Image: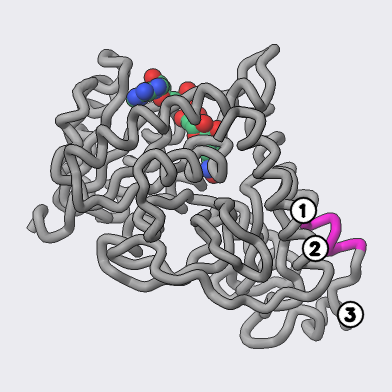
Amino acid sequence: VTQQRGKVSVVGAGAVGTAISYACLLRGTAGHIALLDIDEAKVRAEVLDLNHGTQFVPACTVEGSADVAVTAGSDVVVVTAGAKQRPGQSRLDLAGANVAMARTVVPRLLEHSPQAVVVLVTNPVDVVTYAAIKVCGLSDGRVFGSGTVLDSSRLRFLLARHAGVAVGNVHAYVVGEHGDSELPLWSSATIGGVPLAAYPVDGRPLDAATRNAIAREVTDAAYEIIKGKGATSLAIGLATARIAEAVLRDERRVLPVSSLLRRWRGVDDVCLSLPSVVGRRGVERVLPTSLDAVELEGLRRSAEAVRSVARAVGV
Ligand SMILES: NC(=O)c1ccc[n+]([C@@H]2O[C@H](COP(=O)([O-])OP(=O)(O)OC[C@H]3O[C@@H](n4cnc5c(N)ncnc54)[C@H](O)[C@@H]3O)[C@@H](O)[C@H]2O)c1
């Protein structure tokens, strides 16, 4: 049974990697979970803690190590390893260290799991994903980033709360960089099949001020959470488990993940998030989502923002 449900490896047993493993365990995402971290005591402790709960969840074996061999034969490898922003450290410093990590770690992971799909979560995720794709020479969608799946779920949560409907009935995407230059696609957002622009709440459709406030809340969410609890973890854990399931079960689910764009409405050779079909081979197709003129301009600006960080760290 466990083999049928596949193997997920999670690299980095910090706040994010542990939350992803826990979400996978609860959801029955995989039959086997492996954790890899350079901190041996930490990875051992997390594996013990997860294993002690296996009586209460769908059958799953959990192991962990500081040796990359623990990840061998994975179907999906999720990378969360790397530095978090520390006091006095710039975003560029973070990018440099984490790009270097991805360049050494991802090829070694693929050596041990030649069939795996690799999902990067480490920030800045679009730049780290681009660096990993280039170093492996795999531009066919097998290596991609978690992108704005989390940001889109934040948007859907806020719209659902505003409209008083279930979050599953809101369809709306945040696209572009996973970061400050991201943008919500208002023009294609719908609630229960009704275009958002025509969806009345208290007799009025969503006005520009409310839209802007919601967009700001989505972009600023991470800052508020990091201020209060040190790291965002639980929602990215669930989002990443969902991405892993789309791959393992070959669901061909539409998710706004970050992949290498090729001449997408004039945006080329940069990793950004757009609604994409995710299945057993990774990102199988980037959808021809319709953007209005303002949104297209926003996406191009976002591409420039990601490129300038990449350039600054020599990617
Ligand atoms: N993409 C997203 O939506 C999203 C959301 C939240 C956090 N993140 C990012 O995820 C990353 C991890 O965040 P966190 O809060 O878990 O940090 P953390 O410091 O709690 O954990 C990072 C772990 O990585 C390990 N590590 C470092 N280098 C390693 C290597 N070469 N091999 C194996 N393990 C290694 C460390 O020992 C540590 O346990 C950060 O870059 C963060 O910005 C991304």
Could you tell me if the residues under marks 1 and 2 are in contact, i.e. CB atoms within 8 Å? yes
Q: Residues within 10 Å of mark 3 (few under 14, many from 20)?
A: few
The answer for how far apart the CA atoms under marks 2 and 3 are is 28 Å
Amino acid identity at mark 2: Glu
Amino acid identity at mark 3: Arg
**Residue 301 badge:** 1
Picture coordinates of residue 176 (x, y %)?
Answer: 65, 56
**Number of dots carrying numbers:** 3
Residue underneath mark 3: 204
Picture coordinates of residue 7 (x, y %)?
Answer: 19, 49
Depicted 68 relative to depicted 26: above or below: above
**Residue 194 badge:** none
Q: Tell me the quadrant of the picture where the N terminus can be found.
A: bottom left
Mark in front: 2 vs 3: 2
Q: Is residue 218 visible?
A: no
Indicate how the structure is coloured in the image. Answer: one colour
Depicted 247 relative to depicted 79: above or below: below
Residue underneath mark 2: 297
Q: Residues within 10 Å of mark 1 (few under 14, many from 20)?
A: some
The residue range painted magenta reads 209-215
Residue closer to the observer: 105 or 248: 105
Q: Residues within 10 Å of mark 2 (few under 14, many from 20)?
A: few
Q: Is residue 214 magenta?
A: yes
